[in-house]
Amino acid sequence: MTLADVINVLEAAYPPGRAESWDAVGLVCGDPAQSVRRVLFAVDPVPVVAEEALDWGADLIVTHHPLYLRGTTSVAATTYKGRLIHDLIRNDVALYTAHTNADVANPGVSDALARAVGLVGDLVSLQPFPDDPWRGLGRIGELARTMTLGEFAEQALAGLPTTSWGLRVAGDQSRPVRRVAVSGGSGDSLLGTARAADVDVFLTADLRHHPASEFVETGGPALVDAAHWATEWPWLDSAASILSSSGVNVETRVSATVTDAWTRGY
Ligand SMILES: [Zn+2]
């Protein structure tokens, strides 16, 4: 298989044209003509993931987060990112990113997150595209039964990969919850949308004190704030499965290395 064959499958599932205008998705390094046998999926393009790829003999790393997002004038090995790019190119390892185009896809990042935290049945987009209601940011779904906010938090914690500090919850722990909104990654911008969607709880990552406090104090849904990496990691399996079942003959692996920025909670 060539890298171009793999990219065709990924771009059918995660059309680059659906990425946000500020985003940088697609091929970061690699030659579309090079052959690909092993593909490693990871959230972050960081040195520990590159090492894992080299150790396993991967030909391609597919990450959720972009390596370069802003204008770049040097990939010299004297820089942090340049070092990583050098290590990859020297070892014939390609790097490909599916970021906001994977967030809005169906199935995308938030579908995998929704299933991981126990949402069952149909999922609908929290912020659907006007021209495509089946795609968009976030998902809304229901739990199998009504439970307390505390029980939901325990269930979500068990369903997500383990990180140094687990979850934070805002709201009355005994509050009954059933209708849930989720959004993988930083979900601050969706607080208003979650409130308007009349859900019982909104689970996302990277929430800040002031918006979260005001949201809960003014009668909004309860909030669950998880580790950024943990909310996006469930998608890796989904993306790997799409590639495996596409007929492209490659071996896939999902990196279990925790690359969340926060490495210890006290
Ligand atoms: Zn993210």
Image (cartoon, grey):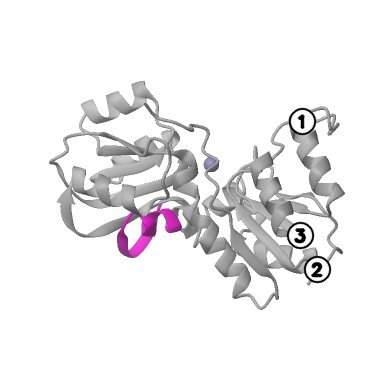
| x then y, percent, for residue 207 | 40, 31
Question: Mark 2–mark 3 contact, CB under 8 Å?
Answer: no
Q: Which residue is mark 3?
A: 59
Disc 2 packing (10 Å; few <14; some 14–19; many ≥20): some
Residue at 79% in and 35% down: 83
Instruction: Using the numbered discs, state the Cα–Cα distance from disc 2 to disc 1 in whole angstroms.
Output: 29 Å
Q: Quadrant of residue 205?
A: top left
Disc sitting over residue 2 in the figure: 2
Would residue 6 be counted in the magenta stretch? no
Q: Which residue is mark 1?
A: 71
Query: Seen in the image, is 203 located left or right of residue 173?
Result: right
Q: Quadrant of the C terminus?
A: top left
In the image as oriented, which residue stretches furthest toward the top?
210
| x then y, percent, for residue 256 | 53, 52
Instruction: Using the numbered discs, state the Cα–Cα distance from disc 2 to disc 3 in whole angstroms.
Output: 10 Å
Residue at 58% in and 64% down: 240
Q: At label 2, which amino acid type do we have?
A: Thr
Instruction: Using the numbered discs, state the Cα–Cα distance from disc 1 to disc 3 in whole angstroms.
Output: 26 Å
Query: Seen in the image, is 182 located left or right of residue 41?
Result: left
Residue 104 in view (yes/no):
yes
Q: Quadrant of the N terminus?
A: bottom right
Q: At label 3, which amino acid type do we have?
A: Asp
Disc 1 packing (10 Å; few <14; some 14–19; many ≥20): few
Secondary structure at badge 1 equals loop
Residue at 44% in and 34% down: 189
Count of numbered marks: 3
Secondary structure at badge 2 equals loop
In the image as oriented, which residue stretches furthest toward the front?
55
Secondary structure at badge 3 equals loop
